[in-house]
C-alpha cells in the first residue's frame, strides 16, 4: 500500500509539472507579444491593401478627368477654328461684295449718263446732217436718209448676278471654305453650289 501511494504521488507530481509548463507557455508574456505582433502585421497588411485599392481608384478617376479635360480642350480649339474660319469668310465676302457694289454703282451711273446723253447726241447729229444737206444740196433729188447708231441693250441683270455668284463661289472654294458656309453667304441652292465647285475647282 505504501508503494502504491508513493507511486501515485510521484505520478501526480509529474503531471503537475507538465501542466504547469503548458500553462506557462500559453499564458506567458512572450506568446502574448507574438500574438499581438501577428495581429498588428495583419492589420498593417489590411490597411496597405485597402490603401493600394483606393490609390488605384483615385488614379483611374484622375485619368478619366484628364481625358475629359483633353477632350474639352480639343472641342474648344475646334470651335475657335470654326469661328475664325467664319470670320475670315465674312471678311472675304465683304471684300468681294464691296468692289462689286462700287463697280455696279459706277456702271449704272455711266449707263444713265450714256442713256441721257444718247438722244441729245442723236439730235445734234441729225441737225448737223440736215445743215450739211441744206448747204450742199445734191444734184439728184433723192430722199434724205438719216442714219442713226443703234444702242445695244444692256445684258440681263439676272445673268450678271449669276456670273458674280459663280465667281464668288469659286473664289471661296479655292480658299478652303466648305459648301455649307458658301451656301450661308450666297443665295443659291446647295446642289447648284456643289455643281459649280466640282466643275471649276
Image: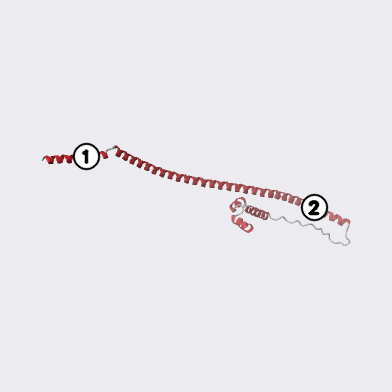
Judge from the rendering whether residue 186 lies leftward or rightward of residue 132; answer left or right: left
Judge from the rendering whether residue 184 lies leftward or rightward of residue 52; answer left or right: right
Q: Quadrant of residue 56?
A: top left
User: Depth check: 103 or 127 in front?
Assistant: 103
Q: How is the image coloured?
A: secondary structure
User: Depth check: 165 or 65 in front?
Assistant: 65
The quadrant in which the C terminus is found is bottom right
- The reply to whether discs 1 and 2 touch (Cβ–Cβ < 8 Å) is no
User: Depth check: 201 or 129 in front?
Assistant: 201
Whole-percent x, y for residue 193 in the image? 61, 55
Q: Quadrant of residue 32?
A: top left
Q: Identify the residue under disc 1.
A: 17
Judged from the image, the secondary structure of the residue bearing numbered disc 1 is: helix
First in sequence: mark 1 vs mark 2: 1
Image disc number at residue 121: 2
Judge from the rendering whether residue 9 lies leftward or rightward of residue 194; answer left or right: left
Whole-percent x, y for residue 110 in the image? 74, 50
Q: Residue sitting at 80 percent across and 52 percent down?
A: 121
Q: Residue sitting at 41 percent across and 44 percent down?
A: 52
Give the spatial CA distance, label 1 vs label 2: 152 Å
Between disc 1 and disc 2, the foreground one is 1
Whole-percent x, y for residue 124 in the image? 82, 52
Judged from the image, the secondary structure of the residue bearing numbered disc 2 is: helix
Residue extending farthest to the left is: 1
Amino acid at each position: 500500500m505504501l508503494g502504491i501511494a508513493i507511486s501515485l504521488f510521484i505520478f501526480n507530481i509529474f503531471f503537475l509539472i507538465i501542466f504547469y509548463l503548458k500553462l506557462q507557455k500559453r499564458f506567458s508574456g512572450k506568446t502574448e507579444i507574438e500574438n499581438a505582433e501577428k495581429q498588428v502585421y495583419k492589420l498593417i497588411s489590411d490597411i496597405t491593401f485597402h490603401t493600394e485599392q483606393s490609390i488605384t481608384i483615385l488614379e483611374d478617376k484622375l485619368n478619366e478627368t484628364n481625358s475629359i479635360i483633353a477632350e474639352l480642350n480639343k472641342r474648344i480649339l475646334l470651335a475657335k477654328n470654326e469661328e475664325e474660319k467664319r470670320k475670315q469668310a465674312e471678311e472675304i465676302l465683304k471684300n468681294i461684295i464691296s468692289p462689286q457694289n462700287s463697280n455696279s454703282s459706277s456702271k449704272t451711273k455711266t449707263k444713265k449718263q450714256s442713256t441721257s446723253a444718247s438722244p441729245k447726241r442723236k439730235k445734234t447729229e441729225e441737225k448737223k446732217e440736215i445743215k450739211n444737206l441744206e448747204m450742199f444740196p445734191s444734184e439728184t433729188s433723192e430722199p434724205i436718209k438719216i442714219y442713226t447708231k443703234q444702242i445695244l441693250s444692256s445684258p440681263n441683270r439676272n445673268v450678271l448676278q449669276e456670273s458674280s455668284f459663280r465667281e464668288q463661289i469659286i473664289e471661296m472654294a479655292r480658299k478652303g471654305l466648305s459648301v455649307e458656309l458658301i451656301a450661308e453667304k450666297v443665295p443659291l441652292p446647295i446642289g447648284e453650289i456643289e455643281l459649280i465647285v466640282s466643275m471649276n475647282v
